[in-house]
Image (cartoon, grey):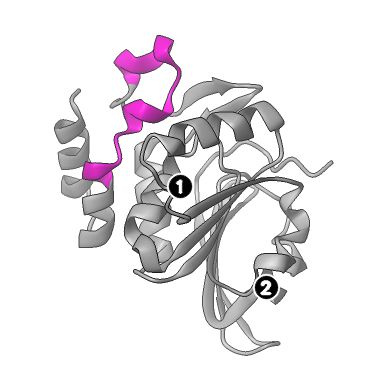
């Protein structure tokens, strides 16, 4: 399958609708974010191993979660579980030079991989993406507040720190067990939650 065929299948399946996300999928090539030995599988709609027990998520899942997140130009977004850097680069393409993506990765060699891949798109040099090596459970208070927060690894519950670091009117999209949960922050203490079942993710590294 080619990149265009993959994108067409996601559009036809109703997973890619937002013009900004569609543009990002076209301009940020998944092939640039996977190990060389798996390049022939770059446009398959399935996860791919990137080492250290981690994967680059399947394109359908990434498209589905980004559609739920609804990122916009100029926003500041916390991307938890940077992995190979593909989702961070997609988000950076959307938020543009007036926005910022803070990408957090707990596994040091994977963090280095993300930086190397994101660098191909000049996103770190432009200051749009910042990749950090740290435990994401406490969020990134020094960079808060965030317009949106998205996670690529599954936690047992959404950490309270993420809720505190979200702006009022902001949104979290994150896996909890085998579901994708959306949390909309209505006020400092009022949160609205939705849930979509039937997904699988690598676990959030918390130690």
Count of marks overlaid on the render = 2
Find numbered disc 2 in the image and state the secondary structure of the residue it sits on. Answer: loop
Position in image of residue 76 (x %, y %):
50, 68
Residue 102 occupies quadrant: bottom right
**Residue shown at 20% from the left, 40% from the top:** 7
Quadrant for the C terminus in the image: top right
In the rendered image of this protein, does residue 44 appear above or below residue 82? above
10 Å crowding of disc 1: few (<14), some (14-19), many (20+): few
In the rendered image of this protein, does residue 145 appear above or below residue 91? below
The residue sitting at the front extreme is: 125
Of residue 193 and residue 66, the one placed in the foreground of this image is 66
58 in the magenta segment: no
Q: Main secondary structure of the magenta part?
A: helix
35 in the magenta segment: yes
Q: Left or right? Give the position of 106 relative to 187.
A: right
In the rendered image of this protein, does residue 167 appear above or below residue 81? below
Query: Bounds of the magenta span?
Result: 25-41
Q: Left or right? Give the position of 70 relative to 4.
A: right
Return the residue at label 2: 165
Quadrant for the N terminus in the image: top left
Q: Are marks 1 and 2 in contact (CB under 8 Å)?
A: no
Return the residue at label 1: 125
Confirm whether residue 71 shows in the render.
no
């Amino acid at each position: 399958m080619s990149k265009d065929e993959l994108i067409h299948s996601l559009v036809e399946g109703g997973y890619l609708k937002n013009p900004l996300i569609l543009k990002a999928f076209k301009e940020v090539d998944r092939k640039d974010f996977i190990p060389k030995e798996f390049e022939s599988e770059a446009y398959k709609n399935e996860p791919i191993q990137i080492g250290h027990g981690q994967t680059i998520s399947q394109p359908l899942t990434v498209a589905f979660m980004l559609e739920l997140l609804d990122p916009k130009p100029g926003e500041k977004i916390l991307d938890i579980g940077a992995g190979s850097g593909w989702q961070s680069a997609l988000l950076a393409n959307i938020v543009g030079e007036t926005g910022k993506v803070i990408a957090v990765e707990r596994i040091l060699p994977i963090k280095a991989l993300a930086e190397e891949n994101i660098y191909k798109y000049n996103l770190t040099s432009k200051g749009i993406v910042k990749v950090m090596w740290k435990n994401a459970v406490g969020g990134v208070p020094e960079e808060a507040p965030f317009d949106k927060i998205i996670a690529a690894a599954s936690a047992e519950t959404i950490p309270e720190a993420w809720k505190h670091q979200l702006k009022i009117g902001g949104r979290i999209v994150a896996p909890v067990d085998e579901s994708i949960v959306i949390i909309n922050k209505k006020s400092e203490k009022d949160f609205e939650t939705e849930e979509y079942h039937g997904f699988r993710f690598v676990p959030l590294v918390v130690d």
